[in-house]
Amino acid sequence: EVNKITDVREVKFDGDPGRIHTIGKEVDDAYLAEVKQLSVNPAAIQAQHDLGIVYTPLHGSGIKLVPPALAEFGFTNVSVVQAQAVPDGNFPTVQSPNPEEKSAMQLALDQAKAQNADIVLATDPDADRVGVGVKNTAGEWVLLNGNQTAALLTHYLLSARAKAGKQQPNDFIVYTIVTSEILGDIAHHYGITYYRTLTGFKYIAGLIRELAGQAQYVCGGEESYGFLIGDFVRDKDAVSACALVAEMAAVAKAQGRTLYEEMQQMYAQFGLYVEDLISLTKKGQRGAEEIQDMMANLRKNPPATLAGSPVVEVRDYQTGQMRNLQTGAEMPTGVESSNVLQFITAAGDKISARPSGTEPKIKFYFSVKEPLASIADYEVVHKKAEAKIKQIIDEMQLK
């Protein structure tokens, strides 16, 4: 019966129309009022209200709430990419409406360059993931990845709460197990409890619900560009994330810095984390067996060293155990069972192996850490970290 439907207009409602209530503007207004309360430095926005912002909804729903949210925060110089402003499921201007991909962001980046804007903001079609473009030290436009955006937002929110005296003893943040450990470093620095969950924002939302009334959720995120500030929404939310990224940029500009320079300063404080992801497709029954064999081999024969650093801990989320290879001590992972393996090195690197539950793929997440003594060394150390990831990929024979 379902396959006979070729047009949504063929679906007829058979019931009492009086039981259907169309959500009105009052819900948008209530949501935007909550978003506005997330601002931690309205004075900086007032001083930098004309921050140059280029925004693209990538033909999706973000056009309805992101510009109003930025206006509620006090920003007066928001330029929308008009060619991508109309919601359109055919996504005529992009191959894929994914803010992770530079090709999807190109129109916004071109507009930002032409207008000499300060930042680029983008939301995916359902406005739950945020893309951010910034100028690097050479004045070139570059995109932040999900780990960088999550780390910047976490650092900004925790530092601002601490400065304003709003930090509470029961504050906590959350991030997924494949997300950069810099979030944990930042939380530790501010004396904030942090939790790791399995991949997927439903687990972050579940923890918020579990701890409701006992602890205060501040923020949480994942490497795949999802972030949530505050607990009045229970899923990743790019609308509030856009507003806080813009506020971060305004605060930085008031101090004569860009968001890129803020990121470099953060890395100089906590260490430079660089991430990468490899997704291997193994089709068919044979492919599924290959993935199964890869995971079994990694469990049986975990790497002893990676890029010259000894592996000191193995986290097996299927058995729910974390094992210290130096002492032999074991402790629970503290999360639900899932077919994920992680290898932690003495250098602070983290390599995760995670088969997809829905596709014939296995994903390997790489997060490496290098000390950064000065932001003047950023480019050199970044290249060193990238070389380390390549070395690990070669050692694990993943290509």
Image (cartoon, grey):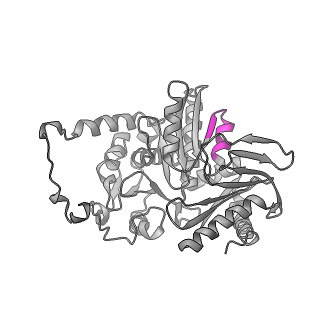
Q: Considering depth in this image, is 8 or 295 the residue closer to the camera?
A: 295
* Residue 16 to residue 350: above or below: above
Q: Is residue 113 left or right of residue 277?
A: left
Q: Considering depth in this image, is 347 or 375 the residue closer to the camera?
A: 347
Q: Is residue 98 left or right of residue 377?
A: left
Where does the magenta region start and end? 183-195
Which image quarter: residue 183? top right
Q: Position of residue 120 (x, y in %)?
A: 44, 58
Q: Considering depth in this image, is 74 or 285 the residue closer to the camera?
A: 285
Q: In this view, does 384 lie to the left or right of 128?
A: right
Q: Position of residue 9 (x, y in %)?
A: 16, 59
Q: Residue 350: within the magenta?
A: no
Which image quarter: residue 243? top left
Q: At 25% across and 60% down in the image, what residue appears? A: 2
Q: Residue 187: within the magenta?
A: yes
| Residue 302 visible in image | no
Q: In this view, does 199 lie to the left or right of 65?
A: right
On-image quarter of the C terminus:
bottom right
Q: Which residue lies furthest to the right in this view?
A: 327
Q: At 18% across and 39% down in the image, what residue appears? A: 20
Q: Position of residue 156 (x, y in %)?
A: 56, 42
| Residue 216 visible in image | yes
Q: How many numbered tags mark residues here?
A: 0
Q: Where is residue 377 in the image (x, y as percent from the top left)?
A: 72, 60
On-image quarter of the N terminus:
bottom left
